[in-house]
Amino acid sequence: MRLSRCLLYLAAAAGMGWTGPAGADQELPIFDAHMHYSHDAWEVVPPRQVVEILKKAGVKRAMVSSSNNEGTKMLQDVAPEIIVPELRPYRSRGEISTWAKDPTLIPFLEDLLARRRYVAIGEFHIFGADADLPNMRKVVELAKKHGLYLHSHSDADAVDRHFQQDPEARVLWAHSGFERPEKVRAMLRRYANLWCDLAFLTSHASNGKVAPGWREAFLEFPDRFVVGTDTFTPERWHYVVEHARWSRQWLADLPADVARKIAYENGERLFGQGR
Amino acid sequence: MSRWRALLLVVTLLVGAGAEGWAHLQWPEDEVRAIRAHGPWPPPAPVDPSNRVSGDPAAIALGERLFNDARLSGAGTMSCASCHQAERNWSDGRARARGRAGLDRRTPSLWNVGQGHWFGWDGAADSLWAQSLRPIIDPLEMAGSTGHVAALLRGDPTLGCFYRRAFGTAPGSDDEALLVDAAKALAAFQETLVSPRTAFDDFRDALVAGDLAAAARYPAAAQRGLKIFMGAGNCNACHFGPRFTNGEFGDVGIPFFVRPGEVDSGRLGGLAKLMASPFNRLGPYSDDKSGASALRTRHVQRLHANFGEFRVPGLRQLGDTGPYMHNGHLATLQDVVRHYSKVSPDRLHSDGVPLVRPLGLSADDQADLVAFLRSLAADPPPRPPPLTECGAG
């Protein structure tokens, strides 16, 4: 195990120019594609502490969204080499259930898109036919106009509607829709521009072993999965280190090249370019 | 059976409500079925197959004696009863417990503790005896030691006598085995702490029996609160059964920072402790050699959701025993109900229909829900004095 870990690290280091010092970063580097740093976290987990946590966890890069997006900027200011900015359509976390029908939303997004650079819009929450509401349609249009990924916490129905609205859309399916692996595989086969994050899921791994069904999904689509911690409350920033450790345990049960892709390379390729 | 079912298909109760006058509440059959599930009370006495002295009167006597014996602590100043005070519903009225040092969680009540299957706010123990052992040797709580407890059992003639009556032999030479035996006696005693019957139990039994006149004596506000509890509140999704708890864990939106830069990881940390403990049901100290009672422990899985989850407490004898929640975050029962009325959904991660959501209760609804919760408490009968002489009883 120790040898394979070492080889994994060497391969990763060779492929990605990863030359960190000894410590947590000797392990498989991680691109965490599902993080939030919302208003209620700013005082209790200040930006510099966030960066310390990420470094301790061996999270080399993190795609972060925040309600009201100022948190993302605060982290970028401290660690631009780590933070990948994602535009969240919420000004406060309380807008989770109201944003899709909020007439002030689109001007808010357009203003930020005019002033700042983002890689994705999300994570937003939308289910079923609500994905055809005007705000959601406009968000799909904005993503197309600005070349952004849609980070959608949704059911398969809503994902279908995203692609109906824009067949060229690029969608990161948050939590893999909390779907069974068979359904996830079917969706990945149907949509070439669909990727899945594994945030908040545990069904795919137990005691360091990848579950049947999910293993086949990872092996069939090694380029289509990314990991994420989902720091949806301030307290969860203190789960990042343990989550990274847990992720490395189950990733070690996959072929090294697949583990490397899911842990880091997919996130870097999709979201990390042009930093 | 058919008579009460027919009666209860749509039952209209004439409720005597004192100053409120008479009120009519309807209890359809599905609601009666749900109410029925909250009884009968008291339940059958628990028997723990992992504890060979569970239910044994001599072990109960030893356990009660140990429970009140400050010599179990390292400094000789703190007993189990220092925090689990009988007159305070087996808790201490503090927001956060105080052992040798200040702690991060509230002292849980011991009422009906023998009916559980996970113990401690984080479920770090899978038996009452394993849980009873923990605070004795925790340096932040009683700060005792294995050798200290063993020496006490071996050296104190009265305790030694009680021990012989309970376990059939004199205290042996294995310190750790003696510590476990002391904990098993403590568990046997705590299994006897069963909360009294309440106004709710009388209502439930009357409703089930079809005795509408008796059921009507249950206060109208409590009945309205019960409707919210089972209906809009969906409280019985977790607080179900005779103890009003599923015995499992949940995140109900209570912050769990304990100090700057540090959190209480709750069930997630509890699971790690459980699996690392030599005193769990999979270990050598379980008296259940069949292993059947270790099923939950054997198959438990860690989930990301476990981070910040705490045990769902039973609701009997809540009354005025605040502060409430795992860390005493809410001072009064009104505060608890207000929390569930206004909880931020952003703090809760769920897919689909969330179990916990802001209920948006009116002031009257909140008062009714509090009235119902208060109806789950009653004055306990006086306890008989503990045995002081080994030969007695």
Image (tube, coloured by chain):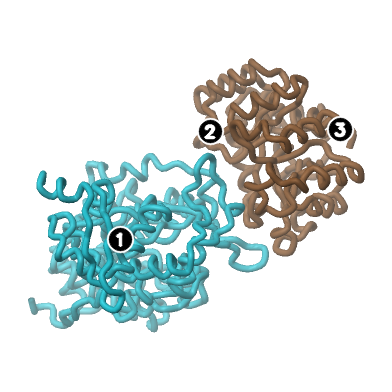
Chain colours: A brown, B cyan
Three-letter amino acid code at the position of disc 1: Trp
Give the letter of the chain under mark 3.
A
Query: Which of the 4 quarters of the picture holds residue B146?
Result: bottom left
Horizontally, residue B308 falls left or right of residue A125, namely: left
Q: Which quadrant of the rendered structure holds the C terminus of chain B?
A: bottom left
Q: Mark 2 packing: few (<14 Cα in 10 Å), some, or many (20+)? A: some
Q: Mark 1 packing: few (<14 Cα in 10 Å), some, or many (20+)? A: many
The image shows residue B178 at horizontal and vertical percentages of 28, 64
Horizontally, residue B70 falls left or right of residue B363, namely: left
Which residue is under mark 3?
Answer: A146
Label 3 in the same subunit as label 2? yes
In the image, farthest residue toward the right: A115
Residue ID at (51%, 49%): B306
Say if mark 2 contacts mark 1, CB within 8 Å: no
Label 3 and label 2: CA atoms lie apart by 36 Å
Label 2 and label 1: CA atoms lie apart by 32 Å
Vertical arrangement, residue A9 with respect to residue B317, above or below: above
Q: Along the line of sight, which residue is nearer the eye, B221 or B157?
A: B221
Which residue is under mark 2?
Answer: A205
Query: Which of the 4 quarters of the picture holds residue B176?
Result: bottom left
The image shows residue B151 at horizontal and vertical percentages of 30, 73
The number of discs equals: 3
Three-letter amino acid code at the position of disc 2: Ala
- Given this view, does label 1 or label 3 mark the residue nearer the observer? 3
Horizontally, residue B365 falls left or right of residue A92, namely: left
Q: Along the line of sight, which residue is nearer the eye, B278 or A222?
A: A222
Of callouts 3 and 2, the N-terminal one:
3
Residue ID at (46%, 66%): B337
Q: Along the line of sight, which residue is nearer the eye, B189 or A106?
A: A106
Say what secondary structure mark 3 lies in: helix
- Given this view, does label 2 or label 1 mark the residue nearer the observer? 2
